[in-house]
Image: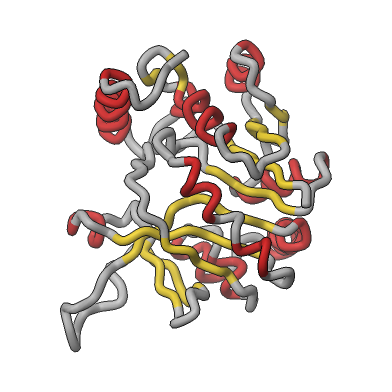
Amino acid sequence: MKIIGVIPARYKSSRFPGKPLADICGKPMIWWVYNQCKKVDDFDEVYVATDDDKIFDTCKSLGIEVVMTSEEHRTGTDRIGEVARKIPADLIVNIQGDEPLLEPDTIKAAIEPFYTDSELQISNLMTKINDPVDVVNFTVPKVITNKDGIGIYLTRATAPYPKGSINYSYYKQVCVYGFKPEALQFFCEYGMKYGKAKIEAIEDIEILRFIENGYKVQYIEVNSETVAVDTPNDLEKVRSIVTEKIADGEISSE
């Protein structure tokens, strides 16, 4: 089975323009993400997918494999779909370009179910929320699954609401996805024909397009301390963590 990792990276983020190139201890954020992905033995190849010349040129200068994609894509998953059409593979793993602390073992967890379930089309990760602030933070999608870990719903709201009991653990989405090519083809063709699905558009969570249309999305729980960089404040938090890890010898910026 040929498995490739793809990191979508766009410059024109509404909340944080240019964040893939934001400096973290002397290297752009996209470099940190790419190097974490390269530590995953399951990957035959890893690519950055971008629509921006600055990101493309930066990747080339750092020896990062990069693919130029259309500027017209409405979502990161559409961008992944274009790469899947250009580079044949049996499994495409989408790793967000704004999670420079993402652990290689966490990425691997999104791949493992495909080795045992030949019918599986889509996987996604989730982790237990330890910070109560994240439960009410609308930038953090909460994951609700059935007893078998199949996704029922994702929401930016606080859900499920603890009316009957407060003895409940909330889970947040970790933005690593495994896609069979057929699933990506569906996503892209649906978007071209209809645009975003109804609830996907309301919540602005792409994976809901699959759930709304009856696809089984397998969720895997991971113990991940990753921090997604959505704002400049998040970037400062990541810089501090990376600085500590470099000082402790856990990681290197070389």
Q: Nearer the viewer, residue 140 or 221?
A: 221
Name the residue located 37 percent from the left edge and 37 percent from the top edge.
Answer: 229
Q: How is the image coloured?
A: secondary structure
Location of residue 119 by image quarter? bottom right
Give x and y (percent) for residue 223.
36, 54
Q: Nearer the viewer, residue 193 or 21?
A: 21
Location of residue 146 by image quarter? bottom left
* Vertical comparison of 214 with 217: above or below: below
From this viewpoint, which residue is outermost toward the bottom? 164
Q: Is residue 24 left or right of residue 208?
A: left
Name the residue located 31 percent from the left edge and 31 percent from the top edge.
Answer: 238
Give x and y (percent) for residue 227.
34, 41
* Vertical comparison of 193 with 244: above or below: below
Give x and y (percent) for residue 205.
49, 59
Q: Is residue 244 left or right of residue 222?
A: left
Give x and y (percent) for residue 221.
42, 63
Number of marks:
0
* Vertical comparison of 92 with 47: above or below: below
Q: Nearer the viewer, residue 134 or 202?
A: 134
Name the residue located 72 percent from the left edge and 59 percent from the top edge.
Answer: 180
Name the residue located 41 percent from the left edge and 19 percent from the top edge.
Answer: 252
Q: Is residue 199 left or right of residue 192?
A: left
